Image (cartoon, rainbow, N blue to C red):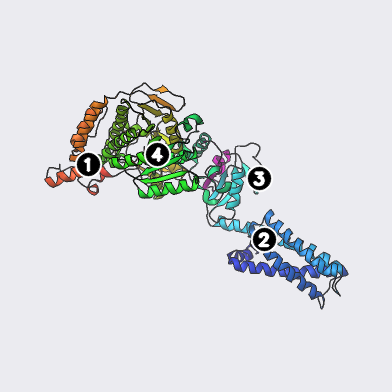
């Protein structure tokens, strides 16, 4: 009966609820005055004549004070200590005014004790009304939410972040928090925000029976290693898992519902960072003029962020994409307003523009991150890939040498090792051009830093996998045994800066990437952490299918970081140094000139032969899949019937799958 009465109350618009609250408080003023007179006369009385003056005084004084004190802004069913303190504050102000009028100064016909009794009674009745609303409407509201089949949530972590998250979710109709779990033995068995705290083992034992659908990780300060361990423990429970970012990323250190995000690959594969070597970070950056090419890209933009924190004298942003340049420049202006940041629209292939920039600002250090990096796209557009990645690197390096730049650091890739695709071959040849230039006497120290895939970069597999999961699948994979190395973008950028500081000329630095990861295992873990199951032979009723499409042109099953086995340790535990053979610069320069001729003719078969001649380990795909070359053959009538000439007609060849879009 009482619950049925409360449900219409919950459905009322908020302005109507506030008017009702005002009317209730006005009624309480009448009640308190009547009780005060009855207590004074020690009998039940009827309010008449002058009594109503005391009632009018109470209402006219109390309601404005209650409005000003914010009593009607609070949601009664969530009334907590803060709301009760607001009641105490408002009633205290009321008591001052009421006592002055009816006790200190006095009103004829009204006993002075009434001026003392009414404020005390009003504090009690108004406070009691808020508590009744909290336990009556609040308890029913939770029941109503549960009756709507909303997600039933457990918060993993009963610390301050967990407490704030539970408090924030108490005001959200999107989910119902049922309890906390925490691995702290001291917390287990107690309560937080009136919710029980259990050990993590509770989830495996009771989650299914209790209808738990979601786990929210409120562990913003936990290490990468511990976070990955917790996620692996949750995999088999088929619960949707979401997480909070690190405390440094939370707005003003406060937890809000909107801070919750899907589990990212960094949570699954990330590792605890090694403390940087400050001398290496600062050696060629602090107080220097630093130039970053590809400044708007995944690695380039993170390099800019970290360089900005190291306080260079000037930071030059070179980028051909107008929007990417605008975005990183605006971000740096906001994050480092005191730093001189210069946004420069330029292509690294434009020698005149690069020489102009360097002659004006005379940079001390250059980080060359500009590159085309998506394997299938470069395989279908090989000429542009080689022009940008190889000749663009050479153009920027020659401009640096001619303008006396101190350090030139190339951001390279593991795909340059024994490449099977144009992208990898173009990056290996870019490395060789710097090794060749390092043989010449100049003020510029050339070096390169080689590493695998970075987490969360443009074209990363995880956002694409997540889109496919949300669409109900399937997740497309090119091969069930394909593996890749992974590293977070911040760690990679920090190590690039430190590796470059150790260069002596012609150095090839290799970042320690940890163990390679099977992409199919990564896909399975993302499916399971979304609360779904993989559909396969063992589970034909599962939610998401994993579809194997076959390797794309130029794609490798696994990547390598070293051409030989001669890696040497350096001053940093996660940076190795390799010594790799390179032909004399004069010979290499001649070969590059011949390459330019082939590029000008768009002679893709000739380009592949030249790359095989230059790069001993290059093992190209048998077919030529350059779109321009194929269309030219189609128009001339020499295209084999089994080869399609347009992307739409050749979906099995041209379709770019998530696993193929592996970034540098």
In the displayed orientation, state which residue is furthest to the front.
360
Q: Name the residue under label 1.
A: 626
Circle 1 or circle 2, nearest the eye: 1
Reading the chain from its start, which is encountered first: label 4 or label 3?
Answer: 3
Q: Name the residue under label 2.
A: 133
Picture quadrant where residue 456 is located: top left
How many C-alpha atoms fall within 10 Å of the one at disc 3: few (<14), some, or many (≥20)?
Answer: some
Q: Name the one closer to the observer, 52 or 195.
A: 52
Picture quadrant where residue 445 is located: top left
Reading the chain from its start, which is encountered first: label 1 or label 2?
Answer: 2
Instruction: Please indicate whether residue 493 sits to the left or right of residue 2 in the image.
Output: left
How many C-alpha atoms fall within 10 Å of the one at disc 1: few (<14), some, or many (≥20)?
Answer: many
Q: Name the one closer to the observer, 36 or 145.
A: 36
Q: Mark 4 points at which residue?
A: 291
Say whether residue 458 is visible: no
**Numbered disc 2: secondary structure:** helix
Circle 4 or circle 2, nearest the eye: 4
């Amino acid at each position: 009966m009482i619950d049925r009465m409360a449900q219409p109350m919950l459905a009322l618009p908020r302005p109507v609820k506030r008017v009702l609250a005002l009317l209730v408080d006005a009624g309480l003023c009448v009640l308190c005055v009547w009780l005060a007179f009855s207590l004074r006369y020690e009998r039940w009385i009827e309010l008449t004549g002058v009594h109503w003056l005391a009632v009018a005084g109470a209402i006219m004084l109390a309601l404005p004070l209650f409005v000003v004190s914010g009593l009607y802004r609070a949601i009664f069913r969530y009334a907590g200590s803060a709301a009760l303190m607001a009641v105490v504050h408002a009633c205290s102000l009321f008591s001052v005014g009421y006592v002055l009028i009816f006790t200190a100064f006095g009103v004829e016909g009204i006993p002075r004790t009434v001026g003392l009794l009414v404020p005390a009674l009003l504090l009690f009745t108004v406070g009691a009304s808020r508590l009744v609303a909290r336990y009556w409407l609040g308890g029913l509201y939770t029941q109503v939410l549960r009756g709507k089949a909303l997600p039933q949530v457990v918060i993993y972590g009963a610390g301050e972040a967990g407490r704030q998250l539970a408090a924030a979710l108490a005001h959200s109709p999107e989910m119902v928090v049922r309890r906390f779990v925490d691995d702290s033995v001291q917390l287990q068995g107690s309560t937080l925000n009136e919710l029980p705290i259990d050990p993590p083992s509770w989830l495996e034992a009771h989650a299914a029976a209790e209808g738990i659908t979601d786990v929210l990780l409120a562990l913003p300060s936990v290490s990468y290693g511990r976070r990955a361990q917790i996620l692996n423990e949750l995999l088999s429970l088929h619960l949707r898992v979401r997480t909070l970012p690190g405390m440094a990323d939370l707005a003003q250190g406060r937890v809000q519902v909107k801070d919750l995000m899907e589990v990212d690959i960094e949570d699954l594969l990330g590792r605890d960072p090694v403390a940087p070597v400050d001398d290496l970070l600062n050696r060629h950056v602090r107080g220097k003029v630093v130039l970053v090419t590809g400044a708007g890209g995944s690695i380039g933009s993170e390099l800019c962020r970290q360089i900005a924190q190291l306080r260079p004298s000037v930071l030059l942003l070179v980028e051909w994409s107008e929007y990417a340049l605008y975005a990183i420049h605006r971000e740096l202006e906001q994050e480092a307003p005191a730093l001189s940041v210069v946004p420069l629209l330029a292509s690294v292939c434009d020698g005149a523009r690069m020489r102009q920039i360097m002659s004006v600002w005379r940079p001390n250090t250059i980080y060359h991150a500009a590159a085309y990096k998506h394997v299938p796209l470069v395989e279908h557009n090989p000429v542009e890939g080689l022009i940008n990645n190889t000749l663009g690197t050479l153009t920027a390096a020659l401009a640096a040498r001619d303008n006396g730049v101190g350090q030139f650091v190339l951001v390279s890739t593991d795909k340059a090792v024994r490449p099977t695709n144009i992208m990898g071959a173009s990056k290996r040849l870019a490395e060789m051009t710097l090794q060749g230039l390092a043989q010449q006497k100049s003020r510029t120290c050339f070096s390169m830093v080689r590493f695998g895939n970075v987490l969360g970069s443009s074209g990363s597999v995880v956002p694409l996998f997540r889109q496919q999961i949300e669409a109900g699948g399937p997740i497309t994979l090119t091969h069930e045994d394909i593996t890749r190395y992974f590293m977070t973008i911040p760690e990679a950028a920090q190590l690039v800066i430190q590796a470059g500081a150790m260069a002596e000329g012609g150095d090839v630095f290799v970042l320690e990437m940890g163990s390679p990861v099977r992409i199919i295992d990564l896909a399975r873990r993302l499916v399971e952490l979304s609360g779904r199951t993989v559909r396969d032979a063992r589970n034909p009723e599962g939610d998401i299918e994993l579809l194997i499409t076959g390797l794309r042109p130029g794609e490798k099953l696994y990547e390598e970081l070293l051409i030989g086995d001669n890696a040497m340790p350096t001053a940093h535990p996660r940076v190795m140094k390799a010594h790799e053979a390179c032909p004399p610069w004069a010979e290499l320069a001649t070969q590059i000139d011949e390459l330019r001729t082939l590029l000008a003719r768009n002679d893709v078969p000739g380009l592949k032969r030249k790359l095989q001649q230059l790069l001993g380990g290059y093992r190209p795909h048998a077919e030529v899949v350059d779109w321009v070359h194929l269309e030219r053959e189609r128009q001339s009538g020499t295209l084999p019937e089994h080869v399609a000439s347009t992307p739409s007609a050749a979906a099995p060849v041209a379709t770019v799958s998530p696993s193929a879009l592996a970034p540098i």
